[in-house]
Amino acid sequence: MNGLEISPFIAGLPKVELHIHIEGTLQPALRWKLAQRNKVPLRFRDHEYNTYEALLESYRVTYNHRPELGGRKDVPTFLEAYFAGCEVLIHEEDFYELAMDYLKRCREMNVRYAEPFFDIQAHTRRGVPAEHVLNGYLRAQQDAAAQYGVRSNWIFCFIRDEPVQDGEAAYETALPWAKRPGGKGLFHAVGLASNAYERPPSLFADGFARAKKDGLHVTTHCDFGQKDTHEHIRQAIFDVEVERIDHGLDVLDKEELMAGLVDKGIGLTLCPHAYHRRTATEVLFPKLRQLLDRGVKFCINSDDPVYMHDVWIDGNMEKAYHLGCLSEKEMVQLARNAVDMCWADEDVKKEIYGELDGVQIS
Ligand code: HPA
Ligand code: ZN
């Protein structure tokens, strides 16, 4: 679907994925299977996908326009397509299969460790019990580590365009599944996802403070090219005091934000293909070199591969490597940055650093 060829060098690199939404990995074949199994009609507004081919075709039109900024109203936005996909996920087994599919693919792509984003609000607001989501992911986390050797710690997200109190209540519901003394061990961090339009990170300051108090890590999306993007980044760095920023590429426009990131050692989880969908190659890819030159730490990730032309972490790395004109040595450095930036246990990190030390550079 995307015409990208993954070079043997990129394919073989040991990888860490820090920016992937688990529901953004729901592949059409599993979506079709679950729709049949759960008797969920596959449709978006007045479009019905009655055949598998029609469903597949729908993935070719994942637009990135913004209706609130005057974009087209007759085709799904990226997030509408993503949430439409979620509708087939109902039972614990569905969430389990989704996560196992993804973690199996991690093994195939040499992703050793991942920190997938999930939320429960996208499901509980459809009447799905939170336990179905949380227990499905928890079982997959454990089984994939044992069966595929892919370790993961997950990130609970507030849905930022829902009321703040709903997010806080969802956090309370999910807390017994956190990785903390007495917890079940699924998630070790809290993030902020969904539509950022007029929903700055500071709205969720109390929720983030609570998560920190509970011993969890914090990160937030600051989407590229969003309205108020610099103010969102400023709040993330100086008000919420996150440990990482998801996207955040607009930081390059403002010296004080660049300084804040570097001083505080905050890294960016970038997803180049997500930006490349609506940014010219010659505008986008030099930014990677600028970040490297300025000493801003970042790593390469995939966001929502199924709704972004089937470009996964290897395809995103391939783009950074070729279109960003980065050397093999620099690509190994980016893979190492992901290990630096991740919140895995020290023994897991040590193992991956060791593997990266052994990568042959031509
Ligand atoms: N951006 C913001 N929120 C999201 C995304 C995304 O790409 N995917 C799922 N939630
Ligand atoms: Zn994202």
Image: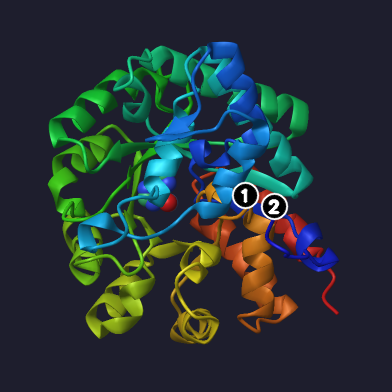
Q: Quadrant of residue 319?
A: bottom right
Dot 2: what SS? helix
Give percent across and percent down for residue 344.
Answer: 54, 43
Is residue 20 something one can see in this rendering?
yes
Say how many tags the image has: 2
What residue is pinned by disc 1? 349
What residue is pinned by disc 2? 352
Q: In the visual, does 245 lie left or right of 92?
A: left
**Residue at image location 37% in from the left, 24% down from the top:** 123
Q: Amino acid at mark 1?
A: Lys
Quadrant (top left/top right/bottom left/bottom right) for the N terminus: bottom right
Give percent across and percent down for residue 343.
Answer: 49, 46
Q: Amino acid at mark 2?
A: Ile
Give percent across and percent down for residue 291.
Answer: 46, 80
Crowding near the residue tagged with mark 2, few <14, some 14–19, many ≥20 C-alpha atoms within 10 Å: some
Q: Is residue 206 above or below residue 71?
A: above
Q: Quadrant of residue 50?
A: top right
